[in-house]
Amino acid sequence: MKDYPRKSKKQVYLDYAAATPVSRQVEAAMRPYFTDFFGNPSSLHAQGQKAKQALESSRQTIAKLISARAEEIVFTAGGTESCNLAIFGASQALGEKRGHFIASSVEHPAVLQPLLELKKQGHSLTLLRVDAEGRVSLKELEKAIRPETFLVSVMYANNEIGTLQPISEIGKLLKKINQQRLVKKQGRIYFHTDACQAGGLHDLSAPLLGVDLMTVNGGKIYGPKQSGFLYIKTGTPISPLILGGGQEKGLRSGTENVAFAVGLAKALELAQKGRQKESLRLFALQNNLYRALQKKFPKLFLNGPRPALNARLVNNLNFTLPGVEGEAMLLYLDAHGIAVSTGSACSLNNHQPSQVLKAIGLSAKQAQDNIRISFGSNTTKAGLDYFVKTLGLLLKQLGKVVNEAK
Ligand SMILES: *Cc1c(COP(=O)(O)O)cnc(C)c1O
């Protein structure tokens, strides 16, 4: 690994899939709840009740945005906690019984690790294969279902390669299967989706998606990190993971983070209101960038689906440049003020090539020569042009002129 000296004062942030800045409006909405309205929502005095009101009105705002009821929203400390609550919390309903769990093979570790833990405890787990673009197949899902299947967890949008999964189709399929199971007196299959990457740009209507459980976090939609919620459809069995004073209807004890609940609701409101317009703006940037990359680097190939509104996140491009290591690209770009991410140094910092890239059929080498660009509110065409130009400079420096068109 080579370290490059810092070359530029220019800053181009292209890692929105990892973290988004808290928007000014969100910051402003939260601020009074740190200092002026700091009461404990469980307190009966006016200060407490003021906080309680803010908490409940944030819950209502979120519920409305996802076509759910306020009592179906549990605030958590982010995406990881919500996924853990969905999986471990639901599995406790099995009691002594061992159940069968199904998930895609491209889930985020926040889903995958709890499922692997359940497997260790004697439950069974099927990880569905995905196609070359990272999509699960409804047929494979249907084939995987067994009488003891208890929970299906499929992410809405993939955080590495941007693939959108057919969530509402899965929801419809499970609804049909659950009707048949009712007749056969088999247990219901519950459906969880990790929507952390989709919250900013996609429809989160719970009835439309047909989900029983849905995870959304604030840190990916211009809200605070460590803010999030789990949607729990009425009737879905969930036991708490954190016990204590019984807050959040006993499902998540601990004094509520009112400021973060307010911030999360504001962030989701802004995102959902603006998502159509912003999607089109980002889609245009994505198409432009993809064309520019193809032209300049003919050997480059895209990971995940080609840009299309219903196939891939409009703010994600993940590609492999054969012969150029992702880490080398990342460090060189960073020295020029550009922040990107790579699947070669994965989230666990263990230098294992990304599971997701492996699941779509990349060799270890191809997975190593990989970077992910993800863009958002502050991304402009000029910034992306600078990225393409800088990447070209790196290839020249590496003598990889073979990669570059004349
Ligand atoms: C970021 C992310 C998570 C984890 O969320 P945190 O808020 O960081 O705990 C889970 N799933 C996906 C798809 C994510 O992108």
Image: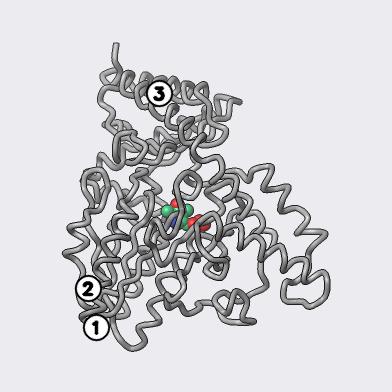
The amino acid type, in three-letter code, at marker 3 is: Asn
Quadrant in the picture for residue 94: bottom left
Q: Earlier in the sequence, mark 2 or mark 1?
A: 2
Q: Earlier in the sequence, mark 3 or mark 2?
A: 2
Cα separation between marks 3 and 2 = 47 Å
Frontmost residue, 49 versus 239: 49
Q: Which residue is mark 2?
A: 180
Locate residue 330, reporting x and y percent: 43, 35
Looking at mark 3, is its residue's CB closer than 8 Å to ligand 1? no
Q: Quadrant of the C terminus?
A: top left
Q: Earlier in the sequence, mark 3 or mark 1?
A: 1
Say if 303 sits above or below 56 in the image: above
Say if 76 sits above or below 43 in the image: above
Q: Which residue is mark 3?
A: 288
Cα separation between marks 2 and 1 = 9 Å
- Could you say whether the residue bearing mark 1 is in a helix, strand or loop? loop
Say if 356 sits above or below 125 in the image: above
The amino acid type, in three-letter code, at marker 1 is: Lys
Quadrant in the picture for residue 143: bottom left
Q: Residues within 10 Å of mark 3 (few under 14, many from 20)?
A: some
Residue at image coords 52%, 37%: 376
Residue at image coords 47%, 43%: 201
Q: Which residue is mark 1?
A: 185
